[in-house]
Image (tube, rainbow, N blue to C red):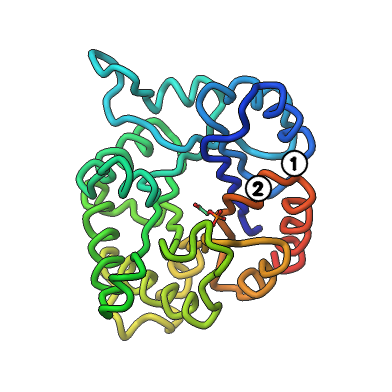
Amino acid sequence: MKIIVANWKLNPATEKEAIKLAKESDLEGLVICPPFPFLEAVAKVIKKAKLGAQDLFWEEKGAYTGEVSGSQLKDLCVEYVIIGHSERRLKLEETDEMVAKKIKAALKDGLKPILCVGETAEERAQGKTREIVGKELRLGLSLIPGREKEVIVAYEPIWAIGTGAPDTPENMLEMVEFIYRQLMSYAGATVGEFKNSKTQKLTNSLKIIYGGSVTSKNAEDFLKHKEIRGALVGGASLNSKEIKNIISVSKKYA
Ligand code: PGA
């Protein structure tokens, strides 16, 4: 089954609205990631959707004002956690080293990490997309050798986030292949083995999803490809009709 991740970001304003949106979007195949204060309320009303968080901290407890640990999230029935979103990297100066510690902490606490990677418009114009994404993968996964395939990788070109202008499916497919190859090289497979049967099992077990201006209008362009295992949806996830339509598309191509 494909996975659709609803990243609500800093929305909605009230718990009442969060409960309403969660009830209306409670669908199989969806992971709802509300802001921290609404996790518990959302957990109580969803039956088919899964619960995700938008971040976590790498320490379990102690003098870390404002932070939230993986075990605290787990205690609230959270199953997934978004890590290294570009908004945190760019606006809050989150580094690859911090991302790596968060990925390790998430796995330690039994959460499924969703690692976000992607280049800015400037980096893309300079032909640095693979260099940037390769570095984010290598460093982000550096503390969990051998467990890379437990991480869902969300390729989110930063220039496509919240702009209404998604990446092309063709470019996305090239990036999926690039990411597969990177991940497999960590797992000891060589680039040449990418499509042969020996590594096919590993390829199938990796989950690479796309994010950046996904809506019900363009979801099919991405989700119809078997290599693209799902989508990370921001703006459109605040509209339950949009989410319903995106989930129906994803079911078609499970
Ligand atoms: P968007 O956000 O769907 O609004 O572009 C995606 C994201 O930030 O993950």
The residue drawn where x is 55% and y is 69% is: 165
Q: In this view, does 216 lie above or below 70?
A: below
Please name whichever residue, 69 or 190, is drawn nearer the observer in this view of the structure.
69
User: Looking at numbered disc 2 in the image, what kind of residue is underneath it?
Assistant: Ser
Q: Does the residue labelled 2 lie within 8 Å of ligand 1?
A: yes
217 with respect to 151 (left or right): right
Q: Residue 95: image x %, image y %? A: 23, 46
Label drawn at residue 25: 1
Q: Mark 2 points at which residue?
A: 237
- Name the quadrant of the N terminus: bottom right
Label drawn at residue 62: none
Q: Residue 234: image x %, image y %? A: 57, 50
206 with respect to 44 (left or right): left
Could you say whether the residue bearing mark 2 is in a helix, strand or loop? helix
The residue drawn where x is 75% and y is 39% is: 26
Q: Quadrant of residue 127?
A: bottom left
Is disc 1 in contact with disc 2, using a CB cutoff of under 8 Å? yes
